Image (cartoon, rainbow, N blue to C red):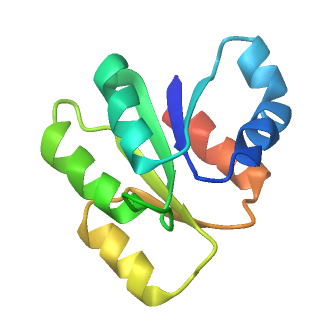
Amino acid sequence: MKILVVDDERDVEILFRQRFRKEIKSGMLNFQFAFSGEEAVEAMETMEQKAVLILSDINMPGMSGLELLERIRKEYDKPPPVVMMITAYGDEHNRSTAKRLGANDFLTKPLDFNALKEKLTSLN
């Protein structure tokens, strides 16, 4: 499964590579990283969209995760990618906005990687 992780914090890449080392090595998961909404749009244009799961931070400079989500839902509808929004803010406004824009799930930082692994396994 191809997974695009979008977060302006670059250390997220190291964290994901450590936490999913076995799944990456086995070829079960293939991660690509974008450090802005704009980079994510560029990455989406080059990926085989049908196999993409997107994990996106909400609060980023430039294009926010919510703006990215809205664009993904308008431009990538066949088949629609699974989009999970990630934020340090668990407030109801961000949650309801993400759901209204078509997010499949909403995760709060710090991520519970065991729970995330379970979610990813159920999608595979």
Q: With respect to residue 40, does 70 lie above or below?
A: below
Q: Relative to residue 37, is residue 110 drawn left or right?
A: right
Q: Residue furthest bottom?
A: 92
- The answer to whether residue 117 is left or right of residue 36 is right
The residue depicted at 30 percent of the width and 60 percent of the height is 67
Q: Residue at x 41, y 38 (%)?
A: 40
Q: Residue furthest front?
A: 62
- Asked if residue 124 can be seen in this view, the reply is no
Front-lying residue, 122 or 20: 20
Looking at the picture, does residue 60 appear above or below residue 22? below
Residue 55, visible in the rendered structure: yes
Q: Position of residue 17 (x, y in %)?
A: 78, 31
- Closer-to-camera residue (29/46): 46
From the viewer's perspective, tell me whether residue 50 is left or right of residue 118: left
Name the residue located 45 percent from the left edge and 42 percent from the top edge: 54
Q: Is residue 3 above or below residue 92?
A: above
Residue 102 picture location, percent across and down: 27, 60
Snapshot quadrant of residue 88 = bottom right
Q: Position of residue 84 (x, y in %)?
A: 47, 53
